[in-house]
Amino acid sequence: MKRVRIYHTYPETMSAFAGSGIDMVIGITNDDFQSALADVNSALNWLNTNVVPYPNTNVVTITVGNEVFATGSQVLIDALLPSMENLYSALQQLGLTDITVTTAHAYDVMGVSYPPSAGAFKSDHISTMTAIAEFLSRTGSFVFVNIYPYFTYEADKTNVQLSYALLGSGYLVDNGNVYTSLLAQSVDAVYAALDAVGYGDLVVRVSEIGWPSGGGDDATVANAQIHNQNLVALTKGGTPMKPDNNIDAFLFAMFNEDLKPAGVEQNWGLYYPNLTEVYHIDFS
């Protein structure tokens, strides 16, 4: 394990990773970022409380919110980019120039995702997404997108093959590009959407991806293991549109979450809460 994404900055967690050599992506929640990053001084205070005290914890990226557009809150959406700007300015003031700032988008920020060459953001998000893309490009950051092939498959079993959703096999030809996994297709649709707003050179990274091992149709241990082992293989290469950009993804999740509502939401982890494996994945 080389990198971990967490959604908070609990002191116990930040301290636990000190000296581990693991790159950390940490987050500010949707409930907190609007007030915590209201201006540069607020952002400085947040960093001095949550990041500066842990110099041996290797924070490489901070995500401002998670799936903010999906909340439907225009107040949060309007606050997102200014908050990212304030955090970036505060990082520069503190000399923490190696830490990038981004936000993680739900895939439903996309208005068109098929075929991938026609990828486009939702029309009511284009202006804000373009401004965010400009910020990410200017600051040397990247686009984070949560992609869940499981939900795509469950919503459209007629047109999506299970093997394609499990990232193992399938066949789609689009503008001469050959796709053999739903993941590559989904990532390239985001690249096309970015290109359409003038920022096709930005790197797209997958901030969440996984497959549940129980609690719903096709949510089995076998399918989860197949999907996630195929994911490991796919991260060793790029996509048809961006063959030189290796697919970069964070597997969701490390642990099953038994406090969540019953069903698939409890069953995304590689491990049970008691630390025993749900199934094994070879990351080599």
Image (cartoon, rainbow, N blue to C red):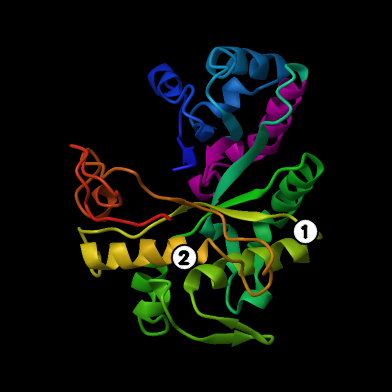
Give the x, y percent position of residue 146. Answer: 50, 54
Q: Residue at x 21, y 52 (%)?
A: 278
Q: Which residue is mark 1?
A: 201
The image position of residue 39, as x and y in percent, is 70, 20
User: Which quadrant of the rendered structure holds the C terminus?
Assistant: bottom left
Residue 180 seen in this snapshot: yes
Mark 1: few/some/many CA within 10 Å (<14, 14-19, 20+): few
Residue 106 placement (x, y as % from top left): 51, 53
Magenta stretch: dominant secondary structure: helix
Q: Which mark is residue 233?
A: 2
Determine the secondary structure under disc 2.
Answer: helix
Q: Is residue 87 magenta?
A: yes
> With 180 as the anchor, is 142 left or right in this view?
right
Which residue is painted at 29% across and 48% down in the image?
269
Mark 2 and mark 1: Cα distance apart in space: 24 Å
Select label 2 or label 1 by which is in front: 2
- Upstream in the sequence, badge 2 or badge 1? 1
Q: Which contiguous range is marked in magenta?
A: 63-92
| 241 part of magenta stretch | no
